[in-house]
Amino acid sequence: MVASARRRRRFKPRDRPPSRACLEDGLRAWDYAAGRRRQHQNKSLRPGHDCCAVCLRLPMLSCEACGRVSYCSTRCRNRDARAHAASCNILKQLPPESLDALAVEESFDFEKADLAPVEYLPTRLTTWRDPAAALALSFPLSVAYAVAAFPAAARCVEASGAIHLVGAAPPEAAAPAQWWACALERVLPRDEGVIVTLVGPQVPEQTTARADRGVVVAVLRQSYEAADLCSEALLVGFNMGLSDASYDWDAALTAARRRRATVVFFSPTRLELGRDARALKKAGAALVADAIWNPWHSPSWKQSGELANDVYRKHSWARCAVFR
């Protein structure tokens, strides 16, 4: 009888805290034993959003401070207090969003953003101009940082003179050519001309081709696989979600393999970066560098649409792969 009681205690389901790597990325949600079975039975549940963050029952109340994480009772709210305290201050500063809007690409107001030329690039984006302009500048700076960090990417750009930014949405397409020139002149020879092509059906209609100091920013409102692009160029993707079946990157990855592209891909967390890396390996690419943290990530936090306690900054991590 004593032995059976010990076995029950030994195999009792336990709450699982996030790993140290997840905490550093802003992923602070615990895996609670109370809701693990319900999550397994219904994978569409989003803890803290449409159900209790702890036991995954129907939500009845939310955090009194931020109002962005839901619980079924004060007992569950108190149980989650330790995990939620780490993200509550950040969630309080975020603008209100509907649940469906959390997974949608940010809109970009071209009229309000200060896209004037820059004389010197900033050392920090969080306090530079307005948030929209800082987000737009984060993309050229991230590409330049990756070219400097990954030798394979630098060799590719020097040989081909072409950068293809795939899946370009309004924030990625907003930076003027002068910003791209200022960012890339740090890592490429001054006499090296570069064509940055924004590829994707989401590129805004008001975005046109422009040039500055040897850097040409071109526009192709087509999918990557359908566009007429050169081979052996640097392919850059921000927050692509290659492992997400709803995005269907199979045709684009097949085209990248056919064009023998060098791929630099950015993700908000190391967890998603690892998933994207596995998707690229499955498509035939060779990973040629370890993951690096990107200091020019998105300046603003965003709440996860899957786990309400998780917050992240977009394109915080980068890695390089090559289709040979």
Image (cartoon, rainbow, N blue to C red):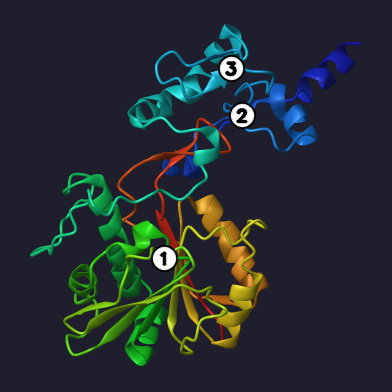
* Mark nearer the viewer, 1 or 2: 1
Q: Amino acid at mark 3?
A: Tyr
Judging by the rendered image, the residue that carries numbered circle 3 is 71
- The disc at residue 203 is 1
Judging depth in this view, the residue of 186 and 215 nearest the camera is: 215
Upstream in sequence: badge 1 or badge 3 = 3
Q: CA distance from mark 1 to mark 2?
A: 33 Å
Residue occupied by mark 2: 47
Residue 36 percent across, percent down from the top left: 72, 29
Extreme residue toward the top, this view: 74
Q: Is residue 68 above or below residue 217?
A: above
- The amino acid beneath tag 1 is Val
Disc 3 from disc 2: Cα separation: 9 Å
Q: Is residue 77 above or below residue 232?
A: above
| Residue positioned 62% across, 64% down in the render | 278
Q: Residue type at mark 2?
A: Pro
Which mark sits nearer the N-terminus, 3 or 2?
2
Q: Residues within 10 Å of mark 1 (few under 14, many from 20)?
A: many
Q: Identify the element where label 3 is drawn.
A: strand
Between 61 and 149, the residue placed more toward the observer is: 61
